[in-house]
Amino acid sequence: MDEPYDLVIVGAGPAGVAAAITAARYGLTVGLIDEYPEPGGQYFRPVPAAFRQPGPHDDDPRRTVLEEIRHLDVDLRMGTAAWGLFPERRVALSDGGSLQGRAVLVATGAYERGIGFPGWTLPGVMSAGGIQLLVKSQRVLPGRRVLLSGCGPFLLPVAADLLTAGAEVVAVLEAVPWSRTLRFGVHALASADRRRQAGHYAATLLRHRVPYVHGASIVEAMGEGGVRRARWARLDALGYPQPGTEREAEVDLVGIGFGFIPAIELLDTADAELVYDADRGGWVPTLTEALETSVPGLFAAGETAGIGGVDLALVEGRIVGLGVARRLGQSVPEEEMAGLLAQRRRLLAFASALNRTFAPPPGLTSLLREDVTVCRCDESTVAEVVRVIDRGRHHIDSLKCEVRIGMGSCQGRLCAPLCADLIVRRAGLSREAAGRLHLRPPVRPVPVTALTNMP
């Protein structure tokens, strides 16, 4: 058996890269795994060489981390998926191999939270992040007339990127009312960097005369063979569409982005303790100050540890790198760790306030009419799920047994949150009581050959 690495990292986004650089500087052996061809994650995703041109983030000093990692002794396993985490901290890989670490960091990021509504499965209805990825990394415009709808500031850079690329954005719909956004904005704009970013996005929308509508949401997408029109409406204080406020627009692309959900699947396969915390984005691991989970030697950082943004992810990655180095006998300056922990506390407070402010209003679940598809993989409808709930199945795992929720290609990433919302609405339970899917490997689609060499 090969000698284990000092630190195996799953996920080469900001947290994973920061941890790898920090650990390598202290002489640790590091293995870094990611599904994509190059490190960087969604935030630092490199543009293919054939498409490179100056962009809004190209001068970001944080990009220097990508240059540094290429000059350190880090074993980069790019283009490789991790599909299971097994005893003795062994990570199973899609190429049929595995890596073992004295410590393992899961920094697999997050995925976008959507909502279900009539027409949400039509071609041309996409996640806001998916649209941004195509525009930024491939220079592809998936549509010309775009409606963006969701919660939170992430809609603004997506709108700006679309406008810069030549699309027409007919409106940006923010489900949270203006009064709530304004209260948070006073706190958020205390940072000079955030003021600069907000000013850039606001100026871009104003220059292109894009309406930025608060307290509103898409309620239906329409079209034959693809989205051709979208209907949106004003929302009341609880997020229910207000009759008589509907408007329609001709569009060929709808972007949906109602926040983010931590990607905890690998932690689940290792039986790490998970708790529900709405302020951190949903189900998250319980962590020590050093970001160690309930499983000894298993760490979580970045969005996997709770939704908090790129600055928090970079700090948490460094905390893990320093902590593992110290555990393995390296001399780590106390003041360096103390400074990072203080930064993390400040950034966590901001992230919690952001997540509270821009939580999707509960009334949006009213858009899940009985004929709406809730599980895209198996085409289960809301009516089918509701019948099972009304028979007393009030946990998401019990729905899996009867209507195959979470058994398709997405492994519940799209449908499980929607079904949990239906349980809350129909059974009157808390979101925590509705539970989560308990996953087992493989958590990613892998070739059968990858299973023949299971750890």
Image (cartoon, rainbow, N blue to C red):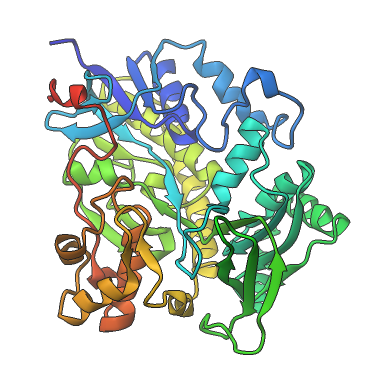
> Residue 245: which quarter of the image?
bottom right
Residue 382 position in % (x across, y down): 33, 72
Going 73% across and 29% down the picture, which residue do you hit?
59
Q: Is residue 323 left or right of residue 3?
A: right
The residue sitting at the bottom extreme is 244
The residue sitting at the front extreme is 224
Above or below — where is 203 with respect to 453?
Answer: below
Going 31% across and 67% down the picture, which residue do you hit?
419
Residue 168 position in % (x across, y down): 77, 53
Above or below — where is 145 with respect to 1?
Answer: below
**Residue placed most toward the observer, 319 or 73:** 73
Going 56% across and 85% down the picture, which residue do you hit?
237
For the C terminus, give its image quadrant.
top left
For the N terminus, give its image quadrant.
top left
**Residue placed most toward the observer, 169 or 36:** 169
Q: Is residue 364 visible?
A: yes
Residue 166 position in % (x across, y down): 79, 44
Above or below — where is 281 with respect to 425?
Answer: above
Count of all numbered marks drawn on residues in the image: 0
Q: Is residue 184 visible?
A: no
Residue 158 position in % (x across, y down): 66, 49
> Residue 199: which quarter of the image?
bottom right
**Residue placed most toward the observer, 449 or 81:** 449
Above or below — where is 294 with respect to 219?
Answer: above
Q: Is residue 227 left or right of residue 53?
A: left
Going 32% across and 14% down the picture, which residue do you hit?
29
